[in-house]
Image (spheres, helix red, strand yellow):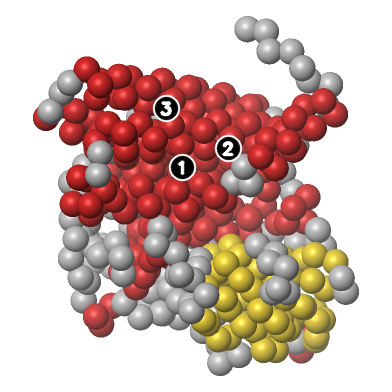
Amino acid sequence: MLDTPVRAADHVSTPRDDKRGIHTALPDGTIHQDSVKNPVTALAALDTLDTFLSEIAFDAEDPLALGEVLRQLIERGYDRLPLPGSGDTLLRWRLLAAVAARDLGLVKLFEGHTDALAILAELGGARGGSLGLPQQADAMQVHQANQPHPEHASQPDTNARQTAPQTWGVWAAEAPDARLIATRVRDGDRGAALQLNGTKAWCSGARVVSHTLVTAWLDDQPILAAVALKQSSVSISTAPWQAVGMRATQSGDVHFDGTPASQVGARGAYVGRPGFWQGGAGIAACWYGAAAGIAGMLADAVTKRPDAHRHAHLGEVDIALTGAAEVLRASAAQIDANPGADHQITAMRARLAVEAAATEVMHHAGRALGAAPLCRNQRFARAMADLAVFLRQSHAERDLAALGEALLKEGRGGWAL
C-alpha cells in the first residue's frame, strides 16, 4: 500500500471552549508553504505526523474541534506539503492519506487548506484588494522564523507567534440554485478588486476557516476569488447540511453581500491550469487513506476472532487496496515526470480506481464484521458513514463515461504490459 499509518484506537475529548472560535488572519498576510525535498525531512514529517495524529484528542463530531485540530496542524508546519508536480507528489498524497486514516472530516478541511495553498502558488496569489492577502507568488514562501520544521513539530515552539494562522478552504461547487456574482471595483492605488454577491453552496468548514478561494462569475465568465470570511457582509447557514456522514464538516451555504475579494489568476485559470487535475487526483489519496483506516480496523478484528470467511474478506480488501496503491504511485510518477501536461486521464483513472477499491473495502468490512461495529464502535461506524458520503464527490458513471470518451479522443486503447 502507500505505507499509510493506520490507528484503530480512537481518542475523543472536548477541546477548551476558549480556543474554538474563528480567528483572524495573520497580520502580514503570509501563507506558509514549502516543499519537503530532503528524504530525511520527508520521513521525519511522516513519522511526526503519525505521532501527532495518534496522540491528538478531539471530538470528531464537533465542527469547531476539527477547526482547532486544523490550526494545530498548520501551526506545527504539517500543511507545508510538497506542491503537486514538484517531484514529491507521492509524499504529498501519503501525508493526506495519513490524515484521512485518522478522520475524514479532518482531512476534508486539511485537504482544502493545502489545496488552496497549492492553487495560490500556481496562479501567483491574489491581485488587488486590501484583505491582507498575498499580492505576489513569493508571498507563498515559508517563513522559517514563524513555523517549526515538521521534524520538530512535536516539540513546543516557545517563540511561536500568538496570532492564529490563516486557514483556507476551496469552494468551487456550482449548484444550480446558488450562483456567486463578482463585479469589478476600484480599491485606491492597489488596482482592480472585486465585490461578491450571491450564495455559494457546499462550503466545507464554513464556520471554521478564516479565508477561502471561491469560484464566481464575472461578466458571465468563470473566475477564482480570494476572500477573508470574517466580514460583516458574509453570512453562513449550515441548516441545509443534513448529512449523517461527514456531518462535522458542516458544508453549508455562504451568502456574500457586497463582500470585498481579490481575483486569483486570469479568467478560466482555475480549471485551465495543470494543477486542477493534479489536485483532483489528490482527493483519491484521501479516499485511499480512509479505506486503509477501515482495513486496519478490519484486520484488528480478524486477528482477534479469525475464521475462514473473515480471512476471505480480508484477502479481498488487500487485493483492492494493493491495486489502488499501485495506480496512485504510477499516477504520481506520471504527474512528476511531466507536471505541465494535461493529466485529466491520469487523475480520472486514479479517482475511479480508488473509488472502486474503497467501495470494495466498505463492502467486505461490513460483511466480515456484521452490525456490531457499526452500532458499537464509534470510530468504525463514523469512518464507514463518512467515506460513503466523501466518495460521492465522484460522479460515478458520468466520470466513467468521461474517462472512456477521453481515452478514445486521445487514441488510447492498448493496455499491454
Residue that mark 3 sits on: 321
Q: Nearer the viewer, residue 405 or 274?
A: 405
Q: How many marks?
A: 3
Report the Cα–Cα distance between label 2 and label 3: 13 Å
Residue that mark 2 sits on: 351
Residue type beneath disc 1: Trp
Q: Residue at x 54, y 50 (%)?
A: 392
Q: Nearer the viewer, residue 159 or 249?
A: 249
Q: Residue at x 52, y 58 (%)?
A: 112
Counting from the top left corner in percent of width and height, residue 99 is at: 36, 48
Q: Quadrant of residue 6?
A: top left
Neighbor class of circle 2 (other Cα within 10 Å; few <14, some 14-19, many 20+) is many
Counting from the top left corner in percent of width and height, residue 274 is at: 72, 43
Q: Quadrant of residue 263?
A: bottom right
Residue that mark 1 sits on: 287
Residue type beneath disc 3: Leu
Q: Are marks 1 and 3 in contact (CB under 8 Å)?
A: no
Neighbor class of circle 1 (other Cα within 10 Å; few <14, some 14-19, many 20+) is many
